[in-house]
Amino acid sequence: MASTGDTNACVMIVLLTIALSLFEGTSAFSNTIIARHMTTGPAILCNTKLSTNKKTWHKMSCASDNYDDDNDTRQMGDRRDFLSVAKTVAGAAMMVASNSAVANAEVMRAVGSAEKSCREEGNCLEKGDWDGAVGWNWGGADRCDATDPRCGPDGQLRDAPLEGAPVPTITVDDATLLITHVVTMQLSIGKGEKVDVQMGLYGQACPVSVQQMVDFCTPNVGLVTNSRLMLDAGYGIVSTPVTLTKSGALNESYPGQLLDFGVASQSIAYAKAVNKAKAGNDFLPQRRPDSQTIASEASPRPHNVAGLISVAHNGIGYGGTGFESEDEAFASSFQITATAMPSMDKAGRRVIGQLMTADSMATLARLSSSPTNRGLKGIIPGQNMGPPLIKVTVNKLSIASLSKSEASP
């Protein structure tokens, strides 16, 4: 038996079909009336010929001043008939929409219960419940509080927060994996909570990639690929370095797999920095950096554990799909693995560092298992990544360079 929504949809389709049919018939109907009017008046229809898509009437008249009156009458008739049809169809459509809203109000439910039911029965796809098919439990009444460390990516509350994986180890044999720089990244989770994530960078194994990362994370430095003359607002152009310290954030989370950090939009970052609603038309974002030197650096270790810092093969600015605009080129600047990710090795990504402390690993475990705001990306089964449901932003950054005696291992 068809549902109320299906019935209303069918009615709407029928009404639209009738509207089109009536609209197409209006012109022919009014032309017939005009023809009759003209044959009974001083004008005489002397010839009819068919053009490509319409009839063309030729007339001879001894009272030529009546010709314009006939044209006006025909046009007014077309307009009146069209408006009449439009009013009728619009009124019917509004009645259907109103009835639909009433019917829907009677069966309104909290999102989440049906998804849970169909998963228990194993027939989500048959019922067309995409949320249930991909494992969502996303109604406000059913989902746990995303600020709670125990809230999982499926919206269910765990008994206890996840424990972080062990800090990645560096053996004596890994002589090239010397940590030369330590980046402390303070994250703001939601409105009030702040946590520190400490990252160590392998400056000896991949010096060019690490220097790029250091510049990107250093306040008042950032990455500059445009002419530095533009930084002084010269030549009618405004530009600014792109840096994680200005509007840096956790932009995407792949639950149980990785976290993706960067600057989502350079123009928005600039507008916030100068307290404007938006950047002007004279703002020029930084281009993607030259990648020739960085691309020649090999990854010093595989993506085989949690807690590794990874950049794209061509470096920062090349981590997205490649179709992003220059303004959004740095949205996916670096990623942190939450588990072994051999697919990142196949993609040619490069490990340039690792997390340093147990607290950092615990924060990684928590963020990578928190609910995400999937939107349309969650419709296809298996694609459950998205921005974190609770906003995670970079509050501040500090960098320390280690001497040879301090460098690990």
Image: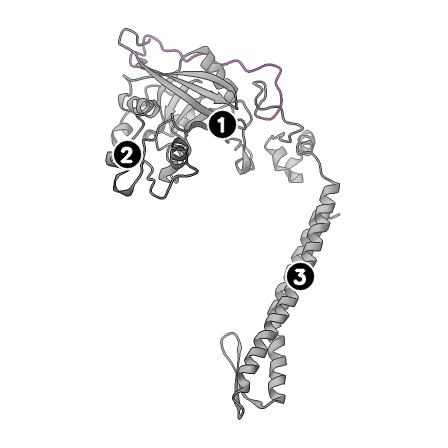
Residue 160 on the magenta span: yes
Task: Estimate how packed mark 1 is, as few (under 14), some (14 to 19) or many (20 or more) residues with alpha carbons within 10 Å.
Answer: many
Q: Amino acid at mark 1?
A: Tyr
For the point 42% across and 39% down, which residue is it?
278
Task: Estimate how packed mark 2 is, as few (under 14), some (14 to 19) or many (20 or more) residues with alpha carbons within 10 Å.
Answer: some
Question: In the image, is 24 to the left or to the right of 401?
Answer: right
The image quadrant that residue 25 belongs to is bottom right
Outermost residue to the bottom: 62
The image quadrant that residue 323 belongs to is top left
Colour basis: one colour
- Residue 238 horizontal/vertical position (percent): 31, 38
- Residue under label 3, please give it: 89
User: The C terminus appears in which quarter of the rendering?
Assistant: top left
Secondary structure category for the residue under label 1: strand
Q: Amino acid at mark 3?
A: Val
For the point 30% across and 7% down, which residue is it?
406
Question: Upstream in the sequence, badge 3 or badge 1?
Answer: 3
Label ID, residue 231: 2
Q: CA distance from mark 3 to mark 1?
A: 48 Å
- The answer to whether residue 3 of the structure is visible from this angle is no
Pick whichever, 236 or 147, lies toward us.
236
Label ID, residue 327: none
Question: In the image, is 269 to the left or to the right of 129?
Answer: left
Question: Upstream in the sequence, badge 1 or badge 2?
Answer: 2
- Residue under label 1, please give it: 254
Pick whichever, 295 or 253, lies toward us.
253
Query: Start and end of the magenta stretch?
Result: 153-176
The image quadrant that residue 287 belongs to is top left
- Residue 193 horizontal/vertical position (percent): 51, 19
Residue 152 on the magenta span: no
